[in-house]
Amino acid sequence: QIIVAGVVYKPGPYTINGNSNIFHALSVSGGPSDIGSFREIHLIRNDKIIESIDLYETFIFGKSIFNARLRSGDLIFVTPIKNLISIEGAFKRPGKYELKEEEDLSFAIKFANGVTNQADLNDIKLLTISNGFVQQISIDNISDFVNVISQDQDQIFVRKFTYRSVSINGAVRYQGTYLIN
């Protein structure tokens, strides 16, 4: 008998197999909700944090991090998201990524698996909220995000070159379909 609490879809007590780990408990409870953290999930036993896990280690980097077996009376606690960053445009895996306090914006780009070969690296923008206003900052180089501390709801956008296919046929040396921008 364990308890899954915090910001999950179905918090409450669960009876699970004795060989279960945190991932099994999160699965039966529906996992972190839309505002639940994937980066800070605690296994609490006897009012002490035994283990904290970061699901990005598994979902993004493919590492198995579920070592501790659950015991009766354990509490799995999912904390709320603190810092959610949007990555949009010419990224290989655009989306919303949660950053920890000590992580700069380069981590979000790493989570997005970098830019595609269609990225216009002369058109990189950071949109951030400052004093109640949205500020758009032009960035010269994608590596400039190192050491830039993020704020919740920051947005990184890299424009994507648009390509069209053109077919060339007839009395030409190299017939075929070509990409142009």
Image (cartoon, helix red, strand yellow):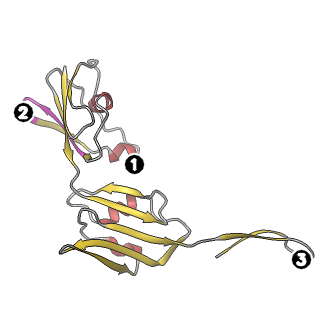
Q: Amino acid at mark 3?
A: Val
Would you name the residue on which mark 1 appears? 60
User: Which contiguous range is marked in magenta?
Assistant: 39-48
| In magenta segment, residue 124 | no
Q: In this rendered view, identify the residue nearer to me: 114 or 12.
A: 12
Q: CB of mark 2 within 8 Å of CB of mark 1?
A: no
Residue 52: horizontal and vertical position, in percent? 20, 41
Marks 3 and 2 in Cβ contact (< 8 Å): no
Image position, residue 32 (x, y; %): 28, 40
Specify whether 65 is left or right of 80: right
- In percent of width and height, residue 66 lies at 30, 34
- Rounded to the nearest angstrom, the CA distance separating label 3 from label 1 is 47 Å
Q: Check disc 1 and report its element: helix, strand or loop.
A: loop
User: What is the C-alpha distance between the residues marked 2 and 1?
Assistant: 30 Å
Q: Secondary structure at mark 2?
A: loop
Q: Mark 3 against mark 2, which lies toward the viewer?
A: 3
| Quadrant for the C terminus in the image | bottom right
Out of 175 and 48, give the one closest to the viewer.
Answer: 175
Q: Which residue type carries mark 2?
A: Asp
Q: Which mark is residue 172?
A: 3
Above or below, 113 against 161 in this view is above
x, y percentage for residue 92? Answer: 49, 59
At 31% from the left edge and 70% from the top edge, which residue is drawn? 146
Q: Which residue is mark 2?
A: 47
